[in-house]
Amino acid sequence: MECPNGCQNKMKITRVERIFYKNDDPIVIRNLEMHVCPECGCEAMPLKSARMVEDILRGQIKPIGQFSAPLFQPAQPVP
Ligand SMILES: [Zn+2]
C-alpha cells in the first residue's frame, strides 16, 4: 500500500492496540492490523480492520475479556 503522503517506501503492516468508543464506553481492540509508513509515521486502517471494528462496535463480536481503564483522582490536600 502506498503512503497517502507520497513517501518512497511502501507502508508496513503492523499490529496495534487501539481504544474505540461504543456508546461512550471505551473498548480496546488488540492485534488490529494497520498500515504504517516507516518514513512519516502515517497510519491507514485496511478495509479488513475497518470491517472488524465496525462489527465489534455493532456488537456482532463478543469481547474476550473485560477492560477497565485506570482511574485517577486528584491528590487529597494534606491536613
Ligand atoms: Zn509516509
Image: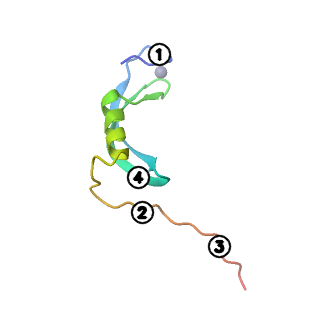
Please rate how many residues cluster around mark 2, counting C-alpha atoms within 10 Å: few if below 14, some from 14 to 19, many from 20: few
Please name the residue that numbered disc 3 is placed on.
Answer: 75
| Residue at 48 percent of width and 14 percent of height | 6
Please rate how many residues cluster around mark 3, counting C-alpha atoms within 10 Å: few if below 14, some from 14 to 19, many from 20: few
| Residue at 36 percent of width and 39 percent of height | 54
Which element type, helix, strand or loop, lies under badge 1?
loop
Real-space Cα separation, disc 3 to disc 2, in angstroms: 21 Å
Give percent across and percent down for residue 19. Answer: 44, 48
User: What numbered label is drawn on residue 27?
Assistant: 4
Please name the residue that numbered disc 1 is placed on.
Answer: 7
Work out whether mark 4 precedes mark 2 in sequence or the reverse, and give the earlier one. 4
Q: Quadrant of the N terminus?
A: top left
Work out whether mark 3 precedes mark 1 in sequence or the reverse, and give the earlier one. 1
4 and 2 marks in contact (CB < 8 Å): no
Q: Closer to the observer: label 4 or label 3?
A: 4
Residue 6 position (above or below residue 48): above
Which element type, helix, strand or loop, lies under badge 2?
loop
Q: Is residue 67 left or right of residue 5?
A: left
Q: Closer to the observer: label 2 or label 1?
A: 2
In front: 27, or 35? 27
Query: Residue flagged by tag 1: what amino acid is it?
Result: Cys
Query: Residue flagged by tag 3: what amino acid is it?
Result: Ala
